[in-house]
Amino acid sequence: MPTKLLKWSWLAASAALLLAATAQAQITSYDERDRLNTDSHIGKYTGHATNAKEDYRRYCVGCHGELGDGNGEVAQWLDPKPRDFTLGIFKCRSTPTGTLPTDEDLFNTIARGLDRSNMPVWNTFTKQQRADLVAWVKHFSPRFQKEKPGTPIEIPAEPEVTPERVKAGQDVFARVQCWKCHGVEGMANGPSASTLTDDLSRPILPYNFTDGSRPKCGSTDQDIYRIFMTGLDGTPMPSFSDNIKPEEAWDLVFYLRTLQPHNTFNLKERQIAKQLGLKPVNPNAPAQ
């Protein structure tokens, strides 16, 4: 084929690809605008996506991007990367793994922020502003138009902390192999820690129980329990709802509290661990 003809063929192919990409972007923008009637409902507050446009542009677009795809202007410098809202996949939920979060889940995440990330505590927003922002976040993903949120899991009443429960929690920690990621002392240095990636193949670190930081999805005992049973979608942290019983989940909560030396709410658990002379789990011990 003559050189000139090759050149024009290449230019035509490039133009076709550019037009296809532009058309896809236009479709994406159109679909996004078409979902602007999305609402949220949190208690007595009803949020409307259209009311959150200016707040999102002022406070959120730099990280999460105009289309909510996590490709904002500063996203390239952030680690961990901002959430891609278009996927409808969220770590912090009260609902079973693989299901959408409730409006209240998103509402609480905005207020709480995500420790060890660039997502701050947005305590400057009123509750109405937060409700509107929840609706705005939802409007980015078609999942919210097609699916309902999952049914929140039930969290049984928290039992009393006892030496037997702390020791049982350590047994659960060993049995479901939490140590492979979090390490035998909870220092996020397990044998699998350096190999972990999220669902988009980006490196991700396990939570370090010993460094004093808050778990991303809440720091109360109920929050920790919920994380076991829902998992953190989009990350290697699975749901253990099919592997451990509710009472075992509480035991695990109590044991993990012994690994948090900077936590002021776990004095009883730490005292019990000291009384027991609790040593780190032994990965080489025979399975029980």
Image (cartoon, rainbow, N blue to C red):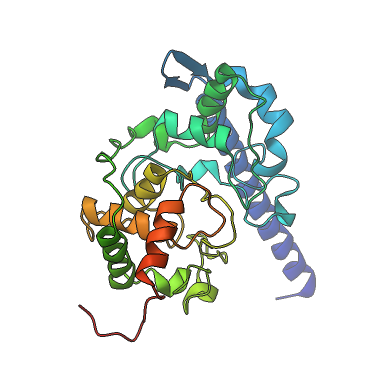
- Which residue sits at x=60%, y=48%? 115
Which residue is at the front of the view, 114 or 143? 114
Quadrant containing the N terminus in the rendered view:
bottom right
Residue 128, position as x, y percentages in the image? 56, 17
Q: Is 255 drawn above or below residue 224 in the view shown?
A: below
- Which residue sits at x=27%, y=58%? 165
Which residue is at the front of the view, 145 or 212? 212
Which residue is at the front of the view, 284 or 68? 284
Residue at the front extreme? 275
Residue 279, position as x, y percentages in the image? 40, 75
Residue at the top extreme? 44
Q: Is 115 drawn above or below residue 109 in the view shown?
A: below
2 vs 22, left or right, is right
Q: How many numbered discs sit on the rendered protein?
A: 0
Residue 251, position as x, y percentages in the image? 29, 57
Q: Is 198 drawn above or below residue 146 in the view shown?
A: below
Task: Give the image quarter of residue 234.
Answer: bottom left
Residue 158 makes an appearance in the image: yes
Residue at the right extreme? 4
- Which residue sits at x=38%, y=39%? 100
Residue 175, position as x, y percentages in the image? 28, 71
Quadrant containing the C terminus in the rendered view:
bottom left
